[in-house]
Image (cartoon, helix red, strand yellow):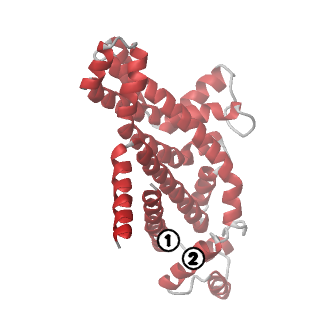
Amino acid sequence: MGRYILKRLLWMIPIVVGIVVLIFTILHVVPGDPAKMILGITATTEQLEALRHQLGLDQPFLVQLANYMSDLFFHLDLGESYVSGLSITQDILTRLPRTFLLGMVSMVISFVLGVLLGILAGTHQNKWQDRLCMFIALAGVSMPAFWLALMLVLLFSVQLGWLPASGMGGIRYYILPAVALSFGGIAGIARQTRSSVLEVIRSDYVTTARSKGLKENEVVMKHILPNALIPIITVAGSAFASVFGGSVVIETVFSIDGIGLYMMTGITSRDYPVVQGCVVMLGIIFSLCMLLVDIAYAFVDPRIKSQYEGEAKKKRKAVAKA
């Protein structure tokens, strides 16, 4: 098991490196001169050249990329903002807890409600419960998160006055953003759970469990759900990663000062190092989510356990014979 986890950890290295190279290259070829953006249109040619030299923008592309990757991987330094001059690493670390809290609350809502709706639909195939759950899932897939967020604000903040429309504070400020951010995840997990349950529910061991007189709840929790978990975990991991990606829009709508709003501010002000740093951080979070999915596979799927345990036994036997 340890070798499996180590293998997945090592796979993260080329993924993160690829993300860094890709976003650095894209922002390098984007039209616009950062020096002009910082100094304004009244700056002289000498001032622009001096600032470009100070920022290292007059160096070849490969040299800039190498310097950036060296600062990132060896010093954990994402550079400084063109606009504020502050450390991007420090700004991201300050905002990360807000984005992480919003993402975790949204993911818990997505997973719990998605699995419950999927089980209800799968165990009541072609009945009104199934149709209702799939209608909710279809609505979740179809509705853009920003549109749902605006509708929630109009209903619960403007019309009813129950919840704050924007800003940061107590848990009340996270309810509407979490609901808007989790709705798409609920839909995806519910659909996958229904599909997995329908595949498992026809199995012989489920029929045997029911013939023994077990209650339906016991059959679902002990026999159906554990065997349907593997594809559900895959969708849940992707939903978890997309939650952090979707935070860019949701945090902007609700004015939550997290990584998403920070990146959006960087985009509107053409502050390329900020955009670069946020994309790298979100890419690392996405990779960690996929790593957690792989580790969950190792504990849920007996085939992975047996594969690596079998290899370990063969090596021990080979060492003993030698």
Residue 68: numbered disc = 2
The residue lying furthest to the front in this view is 321
Label 2 crowd (10 A; few <14 / some 14-19 / many >=20): some
Circle 2/circle 1 CB separation < 8 Å: yes
Please tell me which residue lies in front, 18 or 208.
208
Location of residue 287 with respect to 239 vertically, above or below:
below
- For the question of whether residue 62 can be seen, the reply is yes
* Spatial separation of the CA atoms under disc 2 and disc 1: 9 Å
Residue 322 appears at what percent x and percent y?
A: 35, 73
Please provide percent x and percent y for residue 123. Answer: 34, 18
Residue type at mark 2?
Tyr
Residue 54, image x, y percentages: 66, 84
* Residue at image point 42% right, 57% down: 4
Q: Residue furthest right?
A: 169
Q: Quickly name the residue at label 1.
A: 24
Q: Earlier in the sequence, mark 2 or mark 1?
A: 1
Q: Badge 1, how many Cα within 10 Å: few under 14, some, many 20+?
A: many
Which mark is nearer the camera, 2 or 1? 2
Quarter where residue 216 is shown: top left
Quarter of the picture holding the N terminus? bottom left
Judge by depth and name the residue closer to the eye, 20 or 31. 20
Q: Amino acid at mark 1?
A: Phe
Residue drawn at x 54%, y 47% as measured from the top left:
244
Task: Judge by depth and name the residue closer to the eye, 307 or 87.
Answer: 307
Element class at badge 1: helix
Measured along the vertical axis of the image, is residue 171 above or below residue 136? below
Q: Residue at x 66, y 43 (%)?
A: 255
